[in-house]
Image: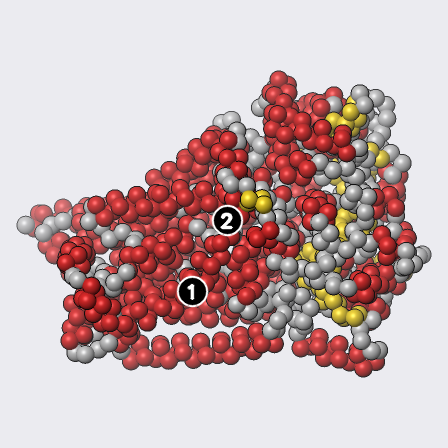
Amino acid sequence: MAKKRKRISTGSAVFDVVNYSLLLLFALITFIPFVHVVGSSFATSAEVANTKFLLFPTEFTLTAYKYIFSTDTIFRALFVSVLVTVGGTLWSMLFSTLTAYGLSRRDLVGRRVINFLIVFTLLFNGGMIPTFLVVQQTGLLNSLWALIIPVTINAFNMIILRSFFMNIPTSLEESAKIDGANDFSILFRIVLPISLPALATISLFYAVTYWNTYMHAILYLADADKWPVQVLLRQIVILASGVNYDGAAFDDVPPPEVTVKMATIVVATLPILLVYPFLQKYFAKGALLGSVKG
Amino acid sequence: MGTSTVIQDKNTLKKKRKSETWKKLRKNKYLYLMIAPGLIYFLIYKYLPMYGLIISFQDYKPYQGIMGSEWVGFEHFQRLFTSPEFWMIFKNTLVLFALQLLIYFPVPIILSLMLNEVRHSLFKRGIQTIVYIPHFMSWVVIVSISYVMLTLDGGIINEILDSIGLSKINFLLNEDWFRPMYILQVIWREAGWGTIIFLAAITAVDPQLYEAARMDGAGRFRQMWHITLPAIRNVIIILLILKIGDVLELGFEHVYLLLNSSNRNVAEIFDTYVYVAGLQQGQFSYSTAVGFFKGGVGLVLVVFANWLAKKFNEEGIY
Amino acid sequence: MSNMKRFLALIIMILFAIVLTACGDSSEESGGGDNTSNNDTEENANSDEESDESDEAYSFTIMANLHTPEVPDEKVLNKIEEATNTDVEIQWVPDNNYEDRLNTAFATSSLPQAVFMKNQTTFLQFREAIEDEQFWELDDYLDEFENLKKLKENVQDNTRVNGKLYTLYQGRPLSRQGIIYRKDWADNLGLAAPTTTDEFMEMARAFTEDDPDGNGKDDTFGVTDRSDLVYGAFKTVASWFGTPNEWGEKDGQLLPEFMFDEYKQTMDFFKEMHENGYINQDFPVTSKTDQQEFFKNGSAGIYVGSMGDVISLYNDAVAINPEVEFDVHNQVKGPHGEFGIWAIPGFGNLVMFPKSSVETEDDLRKILAFFDKMMTPEVANTAYWGIEGEHYEVVDGFAKVLDSEVSEREVKPYQAIEIGEAETSGRYEGYFEYEPKAKSEELFKDNENYLIENPTVPLYSETFVQDGARLQQIITDATYNYIIGQLDEAGFEAAVENWQSQGGDKIIEEFNASE
């Protein structure tokens, strides 16, 4: 008996060493390019041009950040992005949760057909122009709602959420029903509190989608003051990378500095990067069961 | 457990008569109320614009509108299927899809299983946060970083190869390197992000199960295999079906940026082909037809995958 | 449970707040989006003031491409509006997505009153719509405007559709192409600026092999190029060899450039440079930024492209190495003993006026009157150089930019709505303290004596518009592959045949027929 336990724990220790090292290695590989981006954003443009793959600048400067913060464009864009992301995520979560829960209930007549029709929208879309017309007809053009309402429910996210709900033991719901609770109160009082990891995950998915919204802003918002930060970011990255460069049109415009590009990436990415660590507490092992008991 | 309910449910459904269906509808009126806003959304913003698909059977001219444009039947489809590049593109698409499915898809699952075994919460959170960062870098940035590392003109990888006496490798202008580069970049950017959903699913596992397994003398691998993995099986299958439906969506921007004169034979996919052949010249009808075709292929595969899942008593996606 | 309630309360509160702010947004903009009526309040206040002073400033919207990182503030625009008695709204669209927006707006009849086309390619795509009379024809109106009248006939002819004029053009120097090279390296090695392609090759060789920077290390190469056969080095070198500009005449027939021997000579020239390492090995995948970095950091010594780039290259290079010295040069003779240089059609951008939004002749006249005033020296200087004393000063009759960073932010974007060029509008030309930059401006003018024009610019081929880009891909690929040695001559011939059979023959036929 004692012998057996010991064998397991050595195996376990080896497992841990291998596991930790592999994870560390993978994290390192994914982290290096990010270090490159951050490092370059604090370097002088001369050093960036002179160093092949800069990780840590020898001369530390805030020039690039001063440049991008010298007008209020980026503040305005960040504000729009935060507004759209927070508002859009709440909006989307509200409707996705309702729809997903409704469709998760196995006794709902017609749910298979409805589910199929929703899957169908993942595969076919009418294209840019008809969608634009619908957005126009529903009066959303040039309002920030145009970035939110046309993407209210992401079918992919809804399906995942639905499958999380389906994993909840039906006994919980049934006992509530016997107590006379209706479906709304079951959803809000019983199902949602024990689905926090799923809700956190899907919220994160929505938040990231809203944060990255870009094409819709260009198509639907004529007023450049309402552009979210991704439009600015893309514009700088593409100009600075010199892709799709049309020489005849604008020859005398020097591309933005690489350092400015990197600083913009940092500023436009940091806010959304910070969301995840805050959500991590919902991913703790056994979080779900704990909340059922409590 | 979920699956047996479905079967029961199906059997009982069959037996029920109309009046009972009616009763069920009434009983679930709140549920219908719940899904109503969502359905209205799909109707207005997803189904309404689908009339746009009919331009794939037209010679659509923006100023003539859908009503005024000339009908051409299957001409655009015919053009697609008979174009000399069609099979090359089809094959490239399938190969990249296979790489996505066989090489990329398991990575986030394995990563999340590994993360789940980490007991130091700070280490775990730190790693999680780091591996999820690349998802936020655009392909333009990732591809340009790859260029800087791999180029023959002073790229660090080739400098290292050179300094240890090996010959330089032409990573960028050689079609053999396109696929490895593509899939490695996909893994690099998306694997960490992909773990989130599995980690969320893993939270549902009752810790007592591990306790019991340890009592039975199960090692870490066996715990993973017999407890953790079955717990997230549902999510895996659903993601797999959704992924299969996405067969022809391989990331336009990514492939487009990697595409060059030397690797076009293996790198040209439907999206990049349409971009050059269609959108650049404003050929709406042709690119819509290609989109239609892609959707059709996706639909067939999804229906098949879903059927297969149900065959094995899994939940499926509809 | 109480957690949940608090959470819900929070959600509801935030939702409420958003509904409020966003509704405020949308009601303010109601009916907007399509075109004119979306001014922010500040601007409304502004225009109110204006309308008190001078009644009814004509209000309309221009859609233009944004080629700078940020949308500019409206300081310069306000000045233009003041001078032209208009209330102009500019709908900026990021350059990279301009076609998406243009096509969507066009297909949904929501184009504003004045629409820039971005470039010649986009303009060609609108040809059918133009033939369908979706845009105003301008021939009958231009004579009414004393400044628009001055626009160059030959450039206008390049934009005519079936002989009719629909556009106002934005002028560009016909050819800015030439060499920028390391003068200090050339001096070290006793080389002069290359006057023939052989001397060019010798310079590329010497810069690669003879340690031009004298550091004793084999760490330099000759030419730095990028993945662009047109605005990179290839087309300019091809001109030196006497290759036609896209299309040329051979035995009385118009044929594409790659069917000419000179094109193949150019490919062989590049192949030799590539084989010997005189050019960056990965140039077919090198971006403009990376290409320029090789030049700035002293890896490469020759840059073939727009000579105007010399100043931005120098500014960065001198920060790395204060000793660096650049020079520009244009005339390089090919083996046939002549110098020639390819030309663009003389315009960079074109503006058109959709009938769907410009409803009456009266409106058209008012918009044209705006562009007419844009071509007066006063307004043209504002749009191009900004505000005198703030953005630029006049030195010897030239405009000298005071702070290039401020100018790039506040003024440069408005160059997107310029009409004509310095010659026709009478605006100042640039004053440059950096000598090679001033020289490059002179060399642009010198280039005009040796231009190789594209004979198909005024011609039309439907197949070319529909399939040209895809077909060109075949040739572009084959050209690169030939240069880097992945394709032999027979392979290149096969690619040309492929081009012909997939629609190229039809293009040849159509261009020749429309001549």
Q: Are marks 2 and 1 in contact (CB under 8 Å)?
A: no
What is the chain identity of the residue bearing mark 1?
B
Q: Residue at x 85, y 65 (%)?
A: C388
| Residue C299, image x, y percentages | 67, 37
The answer to which quarter of the image holds residue C192 is: top right
Which residue is denoted by mark 2 in the rendering? Answer: B54
**Residue nearest the observer in this picture, C3 or C164:** C164
| Mark with earlier residue (2, 1) | 1
| Residue C65, image x, y percentages | 69, 55
| Residue C219, image x, y percentages | 65, 33
- Left or right for B298, reference C237: left
| Residue C8, image x, y percentages | 35, 77
The disc label shown at residue B41, or none: 1
**Residue nearest the observer in this picture, C96 or A37:** C96
Vertical relation: C505 (above or below) C127: above
Most distant residue in the right direction: C396
Q: Quadrant of the C terminus of chain B?
A: bottom left
